Amino acid sequence: MTGTEAAPAVEAAEVRRFWGRLGLPGLVDVHTHFMPERVLHKVWAYFDGLGPLTGGLTWPITYRTEEHERTALLREFGVRAFTAMLYPHKPGMARWLNGWAADFAGRTPDCLHTATLFPEEDAPDYVRRALDEGARVFKAHVQVGAYDPADRLLDPVWGLLAEAGVPVVIHCVSGPAPGKHTGPEPIARVLARHPRLPLVVAHLGMPEYEDFLALAERYPRVRLDTTMAFTDFSEGHSPFPRRALPRLADLGDRVLLGSDFPNIPYPYVHQLRALERLGLGDAWLRAVCHDNGARLFRL
C-alpha cells in the first residue's frame, strides 16, 4: 500500500483500526506541516523538482490538497493533536511565519500552536513574543536554513526555550541529504551549553540513528520523532540498524509519532504499519503513537 494513495475513507478506517486495536483515543502527531499556501506550494515544487536537499529521491506528494481538506483528513484519521511545522530559509522570515502560525492555531483548535526561529538579532524578541502568545512547540530546520544551531545568535533563544520547557522539533540530521551544519556534532554543542533544552530530533536521527540515540540517552529532555523512519521509502536508502532496536525500546517514553504529513510519498497509514512491524509490542506503540505526546503537551 506504499505506492498509491488509498481512498480517504478507506485509509481513515485503517488508521482508526490501528489505534482502536491499541485501546487509544486517537493519535498525537508532532510532525505535520501547515504553512502559508504559497510557501507550501513552493515546498511541493521543490520536491517535484528533486532539489538537492531531497537526496535525488523521487518524492511524490501524497496529500496535495487544499488546507481545509488536509485538516479534515487528519481529523478523520483520529489525530487528536498535530503541529504546523513551518520554517524560514532566510533572515527576516520567521517573525512573519510566526504571525501566520498564531492565526492558524487560533482557527484550528486541534493544532498545537507552532512557531519557528532563525539565527538573527531579533530572534529572542519574536521567540519571547511567540511564547507569550501561547506557542507550545517550535520548529527549527538546520538543513533548509543552512545555519549552525550553535550560532551565538541563537544562544539566548535556546535559553528561553529551555527555561520555558517548550519543545523544539529540530531537523538537524543529515537525511535525506547532508548540509553544512547537519549531523550530531553541532547540536551536541548546543546541548552542552543548554542541557535542559527539550529537543525533539526529527526523523529519529536518520541516517545517524545511533549517534542521536546516544544524545537522547545522555540528555533526559531529548526526544526523537519517528517521521519517515522504518517506512519502505526510507529503509531503501537509510535503513535503521537492527542492532539498535533494544536501545529504541528502552527510550520508549521519549519517542514520539511524527509523519511529515502531507509531504510524504506514501499513505499515512504506512508509517503506522512500519512502526507496528518492528515488533516492539503494543505498550511501546501506545506510548509512541499517543501517550508520550499527550504527556508532553498536557492534552
Image: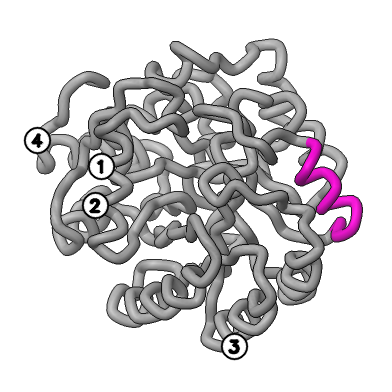
Q: Are marks 1 and 4 in contact (CB under 8 Å)?
A: no
Q: Do the residues bearing badges 1 and 2 touch, measured as CB atoms within 8 Å?
A: yes
Q: Nearer the viewer, residue 226 or 95?
A: 95
- Which amino acid lies under the numbered mark 3 shown in the image of this protein? Asp
Query: Which one is earlier in the sequence, the residue at label 4 or at label 2?
Result: 4
Residue 279 in picture, x, y percent from top left: 53, 19
Q: Nearer the viewer, residue 127 or 106?
A: 127
Given the image, on which type of amino acid does mark 1 rest?
Ala
Q: Mark 3 falls on what kind of element?
A: helix
Q: Residue furthest right?
A: 192
- Judged from the image, the secondary structure of the residue bearing numbered disc 1 is helix
Distance in Å between CA atoms under marks 4 and 2: 23 Å
- Ranked by sequence position, the earlier of labels 2 and 3 is 2
Q: Which residue is mark 2?
A: 41
Residue on which disc 3 sits: 132
Span of residues in magenta:
185-195
Q: Nearer the viewer, residue 232 or 238?
A: 238
- Give the Cα distance between marks 3 and 4: 41 Å
**Magenta residues, dominant SS class:** helix
Q: Which residue is mark 1?
A: 45
Q: Secondary structure at mark 2?
A: helix
Q: Which mark is residue 7?
A: 4
**Residues at circles 1 and 3 in contact by the CB criterion of under 8 Å:** no
Quote the CA–CA distance across marks 1 and 2: 6 Å
- Confirm whether residue 287 shows in the render: no
Query: Which one is earlier in the sequence, the residue at label 3 or at label 4?
Result: 4
Few, some or many residues within 10 Å of mark 2 (<14, 14–19, 20+): few
- Three-letter code for the amino acid on which mark 2 is drawn: His
Q: Which of pointers 4 and 2 indicates the residue nearer the eye?
A: 2
Question: Measured along the vertical axis of the image, is residue 89 above or below residue 211?
Answer: below
**Residue 18, located in which quarter of the rendered image?**
top left
